[in-house]
Image (cartoon, rainbow, N blue to C red):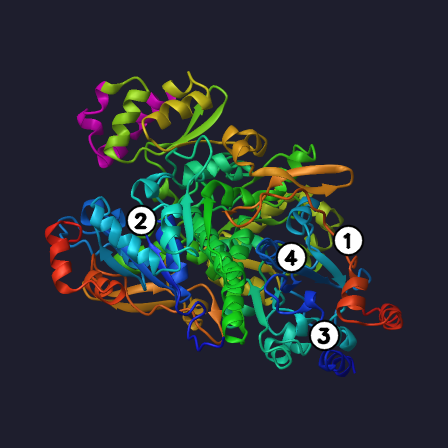
Amino acid sequence: MWDARARALNGRAGKPLRTHMTMAAEQPIALEVADFVAGPFCGKLLSGLGFTVVKVQPPPHVTGGRHEKPQELLRYPEPPSVGLYLNIGKLSVTLDIEKPEGARVFADMARRASVIVEDKAPGYMAGLGLSHADLARVNPRLVVLSLTPFGQTGPYSKYKSYYLNTYHSGGDGFLQGDSTPTKGPGYMGEYQAGVNAAIAAMAAYYNARLTGQGQHVDVSKQEALMFTNRALVAAYMNIGILETRKTRAFAYGGRFRCKDGDVIIVAIENAQWAGLTEVIGHPEIAKDERFKDFASRSANSKEIRQLVEAWASTVTCDEAYRQTQAKRIPIGIFHDVGKAMAWPHFLERGFFQPIVNAGNKSLVGPTWPMHSSEVPRWPGPGRVSTPGEHNERIYGEWLDYNPNDLTRLAQAGVI
Amino acid sequence: MTTTMGSPLGPTRILDMTWWGVGPCCTLLLGFLGAEVIKIEHRDRLDPERRRYTKPGTVSVNMGPLFNDWNLNKFSLEVNLRHPEGAEVVRRLAAVSDVVVDNFSPGVMNRLGLGYDRLRKTKPDIIMLSLSALGSTGPESNAVGVAPTFAALSGLATVGLTPNGFPFEFRGATDLTVSMMGALAVLGALNRRLTTGRGEFLDVAAAETLASMAGEAFLDHSLGQRLPPVIGNKDRFIAPHNLYPCRGDDAWISIAVVTNEEWRALCGVIGREDMANDARFADAQGRKQHEEHIDEVIADFTRGRDKKELMKLFQEVGVAAMPSFSSQDLCEDPHLAERGCIQTIQHPEAGCVVCLRPPWAFSRTPASIVRPAPLLGEHTDRYLQELLGIDSAALARLRVEKALV
């Protein structure tokens, strides 16, 4: 019934679709049916690249479901700051797509969308009649991006995997940390999967603009993470080198403690080593037999570390940075987030700005990781919508449902 | 316009001035998506990856296994950028390209006569991406940086700590994370150009990419929260959430239990139904409180068992458990094999090259590996003749002048 109604609206002679709903490149719509971090980060990136992103979430009263639950917990207790960061500027509707009427409403939205990002278990959307094939019948240009821990096919596709497990399935966890393989800090793996998904969504969307045809893209978070470590797969498969945390540890470089914090120095090349000996006040050891090349330096790493540590303990991080950079040796200061935000370089680039209003505060965070000559500087802090905040706007204006429709849908628990 | 395009990006030409890791892996992604990637190289400024990991005494510059992975699908032209005619050849190539990508220090492209303003003169809608550690502008834009150093500066490396309580010392995976952000920036620009007809200059700073992946930590700080960093594999709220030792050398399995249902299932597997009924562990809060004890009990169970067997055992009852896979594990993995993740391609000198397929499966226009990494300068003549109409005599003269090799 809803499909017929929508068709009637759109087919009305002489009346164009509302411009803010069209395939107009200026404001394409992306529907985000995703939880936790990876999917919403993909949505955040699409939002920054020009999409109007509509988050579609179940109404608050929905706790269970007749269909297979998403593999990652619907209401994983991530800190509120995660949602604050990921959902700036997105519109929000509530919708129970597990009810037949809800699925029809979703299909209605999908008719007018350019991209859908979903992270549900393989088969979940298809079970509701909302697969790419289903939706493409009435919107052939639609791109659906499915993002799951292990992809749509294969023995692990049915496995349950939270962000800890997904990270370690990708191969980088094994190589990171010290006593134990360690996942990246925060939700790093999820963010990496999110940007990988955004690449696929943008590429498929670009193709759809040129060809008039959309498609389905299957993105596995495990494969996204494996991409970041493809060097090691290449090394193992082609020359039999198997890297471990031990083989990857910096022999003589790495972390050093200064008066007011830690720095990390990487001085692998002979020229860099020579420069470092000058920095630490021991230029005479540059040509010492014990330290003449990387292999010898690795063999005598303890001595080197002692010498560098002695110097580091006499300088601040900033002094260490200046002196070491002056010799063109890579060095970084271990900033905590507060120090990073206050670092003069980032300040001048304006990278950290108030990005979101929460209550009566404007919170400072990363703005946008690409600077473009075509895109204006950060326009100022946005806000995060409450769930369902745009039900009326999307269902009423965009889909053209009348107020009675909306009341009925709400009463039936569909929205 | 309707075009038949077998790949996502179709006929998009990328002039690739990059070398090392971050840059080539960015253009690698675009090449997987079907773009035509033309590398500009020269033996006097050889991409170090052409030599890394080769056997001692190797003369060929075409045997580096990482180079041969990171430069799949690409073409190679050997041009002397320092020769005015060499730079002019590259400018002419830029004039018939869609995108130019570099990861030189800021200022180098300008000095070579290949800066954005110069290239725009002959190709007003050129898209230019500059990848760097800290960005094209700012007081530290000329600093030298590698993954561990720019990750430290970004703030990401201290958002969590290693199991022994130290900040993270990142490596190559962080570089390729920046490559992904660079590729996304190019896709955004290609898309915008379809709408506006205009090109743009893109500046992607590695440190900013990484900071953007810990946004919530910055917001927490801004909120006045001073939360201690999470240690190792733990979660701030959830337990058990850790790695547990398995049978064998450096063998581990990750286990995360979020719901009460999963907790009961885990207790069943490890033969500790008593813990399933213990009020202390009945909810997430309780389990977090007693995390140390629970970790010990689980480790006692996993210690003598095979990590892949444990994975199946736990997954069967709906508990999230995955081993910490090594590269060897990945290469032998049945799931990845079924998904066709490990592919091979023939390289004229290195022989059979094994590689990971592109990290997405497009249903209609696949991303693919279609040719091996190029030999140094393999395509110089072909490209200069076909694209720029430079005939054999002119090519010979350019070689005499040493503008070409």
Distance from Cα at disc 4 to Cα at disc 3? 45 Å
Q: Chain of mark 3?
A: A
Question: Which of pointers 4 and 2 lies earlier in the amino acid sequence?
Answer: 2
Q: Nearer the viewer, mark 4 or mark 3?
A: 3
Instruction: Tell me which numbered mark, 3 or 1, is placed earlier along the sequence.
Output: 3
Rounded to the nearest angstrom, the CA distance separating label 3 from label 1 is 22 Å
Q: CA distance from mark 4 to mark 2?
A: 52 Å
Percent across and percent down for residue A80 are: 70, 46
Q: Is residue A341 left or right of residue A236?
A: right
Is A264 one of the magenta-colored residues?
no
Disc 3 secondary structure class? helix
Image position of A116 (left or right of B149): right
Task: Say whether mark 2 and mark 4 are on the same chain.
Answer: yes
To the question of a shared chain for discs 4 and 3, the answer is: no
Question: Quick check: can you spot residue B155?
Answer: yes
Tell whether label 1 touches label 3 (CB within 8 Å): no
Q: Which mark is residue A386?
A: 1
B332, B224: nearer the viewer: B224
Residue at image location 35% in from the left, 53% down from the top: B24
Q: Disc 3 and disc 2: Cα gap in Å?
A: 47 Å
Looking at the picture, does residue A56 appear above or below residue A319? below
Q: Is residue A150 visible?
A: no
The answer to whether the residue labelled 4 contacts the one labelled 2, judged by CB atoms less than 8 Å apart, is no
Using residue B127 as the reference point, say whether residue A52 is left or right of it.
right
- Which numbered disc covers residue B268? none
Residue B211 x, y percent position in the rendering = 53, 42
Residue type at numbered disc 2 = Trp
The residue labelled by disc 2 is B19
> Please, which chain is the residue tagged with disc 1 on?
A
A308 is within the stretch colored magenta: yes
Q: Amino acid at mark 3?
A: Asp
The numbered disc on residue A108 is 3
